[in-house]
Structure formats: structure tokens, C-alpha cells
Image (cartoon, rainbow, N blue to C red):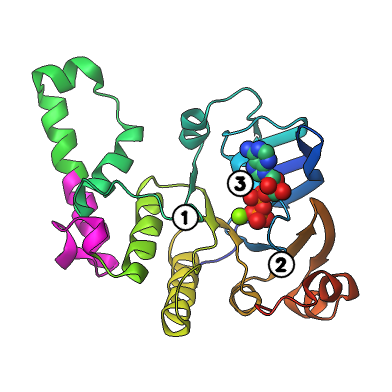
Amino acid sequence: MQTQTTSSMPVLEIRKMTQRFGGLVAVSNFSVTLGRNQLTGLIGPNGAGKTTVFNLISGFYQPSEGEIFINGTPTAGLKPHKVTSLGVARTFQNIRLWNQMSVLDNIRVAQHGSLDYGFFGAMFRTRSYVDCEAKIEKEARELLEIFELDKQADELPTNLAYGLQRKLEIVRALSEKPQLLLLDEPAAGLNSVDAQELIRLIHWIHETFDVTILLIEHHMDVVMELCSEIKVIDFGQTIAEGTPEQIRNHPAVITAYLGDDTI
Ligand SMILES: Nc1ncnc2c1ncn2[C@@H]1O[C@H](COP(=O)(O)OP(=O)(O)O)[C@@H](O)[C@H]1O
Ligand SMILES: [Mg+2]
């Protein structure tokens, strides 16, 4: 088990963030601080504003109000690729893989964000370009092996079972070597056996890699099993935060989920 570091700088700090779409307040006055190697859950009914929080952190939207800091750096005005270079990687609620590329190439392309040989190097295949490409391929293959996807390296993602596609998306995000990993409903669409396997995988990633994880999940049981801290939002408002035990018995949470058969 990895030891918790005592670095005082939060990996993610969000202060009083609000996001409006026209008249709709999708996220309201949202604050959170995540320390290094923390695994925190973000839950709430459909339409609560969870994915919007991820879109704001990763620079797809600029918040209407409030501030976001990654390792102390404000992300205001930064485009998504700049936020990525600060150490943020994410997966999507609906899987987004490059389906015309092999599994291996999906990983290789994701790793290119951190390269510095530039256009000239790529055009003329300079020594540093060739060395870099070799290193990337080696790392990509190693990563696929660790996650037992090496046998599918040359397949197109669409040929993989759905659960493996979900896994591949997480591996691709990890290949960017993030300090903050945002997982948006990774268990969506999985049967209970695959969902259990995914829980074990996320648990293992959290123990093995030095990465802070924010996990959106609709299935309460998944979040309860994985996260030490949980934040609950409903209609953009934070309605509860605390340990799984506190959340389970929280009246506002029970009300928010009432009639929701996924609880
Ligand atoms: N780009 C957008 N434009 C307008 N409304 C949006 C946009 N993105 C999300 N919303 C709205 O914001 C609310 C929160 O959506 P979302 O963050 O996707 O919820 P969740 O992920 O919790 O299900 C919903 O009412 C949704 O329709
Ligand atoms: Mg969502």
C-alpha cells in the first residue's frame, strides 16, 4: 500500500465554482479540495451536474464563477490540452476511443502529449523522434501487458468486449501519467460481474500509482466500496459530503435518490 504523502499543496482545489447554461444553473457554488493520492466519489442523480464539473476541471468549459487550481496553478483561460499538460486525464461517460486505430495506437497517441521533438523531428524522422517513438511503443506495450490487454494490442477497440473497452479508456488516461484522474461513470453499462472487476481495477490503480482520483458513479455500491470521501450533488447544489457511512444515512441523499432504483 502506498503511503499517504503530507504535501500541503492540493492536487485539485475548486473554489466556489458556478456554471450557468443560459438560465440553467448546472453547477452551483461547488468547492472541493483533493490531496495527493485521495480517491473521492462524486455522486448524484442524472442531470445533477457531475459531468459538467469534469468538463470545467478539464477546460472544456470556463466556469461562470469561481476558480480551479491544479497543483496550485489556476486553470482560468486554459484550453483542454493545457489542462492536460498540468497532469489531468479523464475518461468519458460514453466511451471515447479512436476506433479506427489499434488498441496499441490508442495508447501511443495519448502519450504524445508529453513529447518535445516537434514537427520538424516528426517530418524528418530525426534521431530524437525515432528514439522517442521507440520509448513510447515500449511503454505502451508494457502498460497493455500490466492491464492484460497485450493480446488485443493490434485489434480495433470496437472488437473488444464492452468491459475491455471501458478498461482500455482508463489505461489510455493513465498512459498520460496524470496526477489527477477523472473517471466519469466507468461502470456505466457493465453487468455486475464486470462492474465488480472494475472496482478491483480502480482499487488497484489507486494503490499502485501515485494518482489522485475523482470518481463519478451512478451506482452507489461502487462508490461506497471504493471511496473514503464522497460528495453528493443534486440540481447543481452540494447536498452532502462525508464518509460512505455518513452519506448512506444522510436524509438529503436518501430524498435525492428516492424512487431511483439504481441506489
Ligand atoms: N453544454 C450544455 N448546454 C446546456 N445545458 C447543459 C450543457 N451540459 C450540460 N447541461 C445541462 O446541465 C445539467 C447537468 O448536466 P450533467 O453535468 O451532464 O449532469 P450529470 O452528469 O450529473 O448527469 C443538465 O440539466 C444538462 O442538461
Ligand atoms: Mg454525467
Numbered disc total: 3
Which mark sits nearer the N-terminus, 2 or 1? 1
Q: Is mark 3 on a helix, strand or loop?
A: helix
Distance in Å between CA atoms under marks 2 and 1: 25 Å
Does residue 118 appear in the picture of this structure? yes
Label 2 vs label 3, nearer the camera:
3
Horizontal placement of 59 versus 176: left or right?
Answer: right
Kindly report the distance in space between the C-alpha atoms of the residues bearing marks 2 and 3.
17 Å
Q: Position of residue 37 (x, y in %)?
A: 57, 59
Q: x, y percentage for residue 95?
A: 42, 55
Q: Which residue is drawn at 75% across and 62% down?
A: 231
* Amino acid carrying mark 1 in the image: Asn
Q: Quadrant of residue 244?
A: bottom right
Dot label at residue 94: 1
* Residue at the limit of the structure toward the bottom, as seen here: 193
Q: How crowded is mark 1: few (under 14 residues within 10 Å), some or many (20 or more)?
A: few
Pinpoint residue 172: horizontal percent, then vertical percent: 35, 52
For label 1, being within 8 Å of ligand 2 is answered no
Where disc 1 sits, the SS reads loop
For disc 3, the marked residue is 54
Q: What residue type is labelled 3?
A: Phe
The kind of secondary structure element at disc 2 is strand
Q: What stretch is highlighted in magenta?
A: 137-159
CA gap, disc 3 to disc 1? 13 Å
**Is there CB contact under 8 Å for labels 2 and 3?**
no
In the rendering, which numbered label is found on residue 229? 2
